[in-house]
Image (cartoon, grey):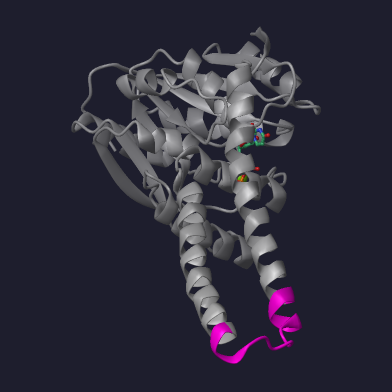
Amino acid sequence: MYLKLKKISLDLIVPVYNESQSIQPFVKAINNIFKNYNNIVINLIFINDGSIDKTLLTLLNLKKKFKNITIINFSRNFGKEAALTAGLHMSNSQVAVIMDVDLQDPPELIVEMIQIWNKGFDVVLAKRVDRSSDTFTKRITSKLFYKIHNLLADIQIPENVGDFRLIDKKVVKAINTLNEYNRFMKGILSWVGFKTFIIEYKRNKRFIGATKFNYLKLLKLGLDGVFSFSLTPLRISLFFGFFIASISFIYLSIIVLKKIMYGISAPGYASIISCILFFSGIQMISIGILGEYLGRNYTESKRRPLYIIDNIL
Ligand code: UDP
Ligand code: MG
């Protein structure tokens, strides 16, 4: 494919955590594709997210061979969201592409993304049409997550769109103005807006190594997504409170009327116990929701940096 383009510069932002085996094939794949495009100057920005294997060594060895590699070395593991943030802070090219190192995101797609960007789009998203490479449970839970998130949150995140995307420099700048601590990148990337195009692709299986996200981590990420972009859970508990209070008032009126008309009747143990249990449950949930927001406020108010860089190589 020939690209009729002026010379453009592109930053490839790649977070890596214990990926010593995946990095070399990744760099090879990228170089194989981009050696055909002299007009694209590509910078590889690897964020070493506190890896404890030979990731850094592998990166340093590659850097000797390829001058276009920058390594941001974190002082410990801060998570993928923080790593992406650091990469975007570092980026200074005309376009940035965010991608995983495990080649689940096919690098060939970047060329297509650049062509679309060249037509005047600021964001080019890659949507997975086929998730057969994921397990059944992961497919179901992720579907459920998108449904719940988009129902509750103030922003819509497109279904089956991961972090893999191309963004223009002005979008990078916009994202970098958001300095919140609870960082759900998919939400932040959607929140800034801009002219967006979605391309579809088939997501490959991870060819080497294992996923770094277990279900607990995914659940935490999912909760971050909802609570960082919506006050709806608070409102739900408020409306639910009103609703139950109204029903209770009607029920109360019936009981009072019954008492006036027929006097006291003793039975009621079962209904009292179920009411107590039910309402305690509701109250605990409401307090929990309140606590989620309060906790988030607490971490935000500390204004801790999102990541600590050991060194940049
Ligand atoms: N990753 C990271 N920090 C972490 C976890 C993951 O930088 O704490 C990186 C990882 O090395 C990979 C990308 O994020 O390049 C996606 O991770 P993974 O492939 O495990 O996620 P999945 O594809 O299973 O969602
Ligand atoms: Mg992966």
Q: Which quadrant would residue 40 be assigned to in this image?
A: top left
Answer with the quarter of the image where residue 7 lies.
top left
Image side of residue 144 versus residue 5, left or right: right
Nearest the camera: 311 or 292? 292
Q: Nearer the viewer, residue 26 or 10?
A: 10
One can see residue 130 in this view: no
Residue 134 part of the magenta segment: no
For the residue pair 182 and 261, the one nearer the viewer reads as: 261
Q: Is residue 62 visible?
A: yes
Q: Is residue 263 left or right of residue 160?
A: right
Task: Name the residue at 68% across, 54% down.
Answer: 284
Q: Is residue 43 above or below residue 110?
A: above
Quarter placement of the C terminus: top right
Residue 267, magenta (yes or no)? yes
Q: Image point 36% across, 42% down: which residue? A: 125
Q: Whole-percent x and y of residue 192?
A: 34, 31
Residue 13, image x, y percentages: 51, 25
Determine the residue positioned at 52% across, 56% down: 145
If the image is split into quadrants, where does the N terminus sit? top left
Q: Which residues are magenta?
A: 260-273
